[in-house]
Image (spheres, rainbow, N blue to C red):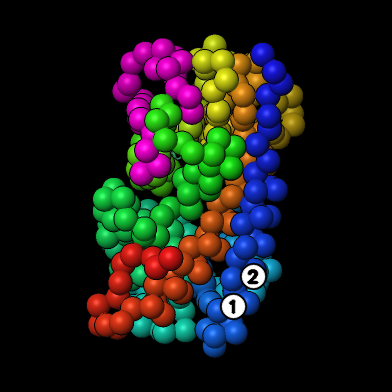
Amino acid sequence: MSAVTLIDGKAAAARVIAEVTDEVKVFKANGIAPALAVVLVGEDPASQVYVRNKVRRAEECGIRSLEFELPSQCQAGRLLALIDTLNADASVHGILVQLPLPAHIDEHLVLQAIAPVKDVDGFHAANVGGLTQGREVLTPCTPAGCLRLLQDTCGDLSGKHAVVIGRSNIVGKPMAALLLKAHCTVTVVHSRSTHLPELCRLADIVVAAVGRPRLVKGDWLKDGAVVIDVGINRLDEGGRARLVGDVDFDSACTRAAAITPVPGGVGPMTIALLMKNTLAAARLQHSSVDRSQPAMEIPA
Ligand code: NDP
């Protein structure tokens, strides 16, 4: 079979960022300055890096960014009060609370406090529900980025059989909903599923979002499958830190038609789609006729 194509997430993300940068100019020409508020609770170094990257990327696109840092011991009430203030601030279009939160704060309560029209992570129940109904709502960034990579690679996804490995609220479930919306036949597998290799071998598309280094082997794939590896696993190999995905890249390359590398595949798309969602949120907030009842569906 012919050589595997590497799906270049950096190049795809750069295209999304260029689109966003152009759209921001149009917003500004219409007197709207899109703005994203990023809230970090605690001092987790990985979260600090993620927040810094999001803020930097927003600024590169011309999106105004506001950063809020709360100490790890802060009570939920203080965070909820900040979210209320940001919800009420018409100059803020997107609100992102960096996860994970410290264990004493109820994550669900916090995510439900964000106004659905400002929920640029797409985790609010109203947006999750809208997505499962197939509506154009704010959608979690990582699966939205995966979908875009798949559409860039395969074109129309209609009728393709996709196996999604993982059923988290952040990746697996919304990924399955997006693929269904794109008219795929979707199988979702998880830690209690049996016959994983056999199920994967039926798939035209495999999306691995598991958090288990190199779980998916080449002989789990049918010839010509397209593989999206969402996993980010930090390994120490021979004293050297290394990032690997949930797919055994070398053996997968002997079967797949196309595959995302780790790093450089899905990762860059997540932040790019966050920027896209910030603009979608701004569009939502400036298109609603009845301001007391914000429209939930993103206008074209
Ligand atoms: P979670 O831990 O929340 O979910 C993992 C899922 O994998 C669960 O549904 C779990 O099943 C399933 N699972 C675990 N072990 C197995 C197994 N042996 N066989 C089949 N299924 C299994 O992880 P996330 O969804 O948040 O993230 C998944 C991966 O993606 C991680 O490596 C994470 O770092 C990465 N990630 C990357 C992002 C990016 O921007 N590139 C963004 C977000 C995540 P069960 O439900 O039964 O427990």
Residue hosting label 1: 26
**Quadrant (top left/top right/bottom left/bottom right) for the C terminus:** bottom left
**Residue 277 visible in the snapshot:** yes
Residue hosting label 2: 22
Q: Which residue is located at x 42 percent, y 84 percent?
A: 90
The quarter of the picture where residue 30 lies is bottom right
**Quadrant (top left/top right/bottom left/bottom right) for the N terminus:** top right
Q: Which residue is located at x 40 percent, y 42 percent?
A: 182
- 113 vs 215, left or right, is left
Q: Which residue is located at x 36 percent, y 44 percent?
A: 181
Q: Is residue 79 above or below residue 89?
A: above
Q: Position of residue 239 (x, y in %)?
A: 74, 29
Q: Tag 1: residue type? A: Val
Q: Position of residue 5 (x, y in %)?
A: 68, 29
Q: Is residue 2 above or below residue 185?
A: above
Give the CA separation, mark 1 to mark 2: 7 Å
Q: Callout 2: 10 Å neighbours few (<14), some, many (20+)?
A: few
Quarter of the picture for ligand 1? top left
Would the CB of label 2 be found within 8 Å of ligand 1?
Answer: no
Helix, strand or loop at label 2? It is: helix
- 22 vs 126, left or right, is right
Q: Position of residue 36 (x, y in %)?
A: 52, 72
Q: Position of residue 299 (x, y in %)?
A: 39, 68
Residues in magenta, as a range: 181-206
Q: Are marks 1 and 2 in contact (CB under 8 Å)?
A: yes
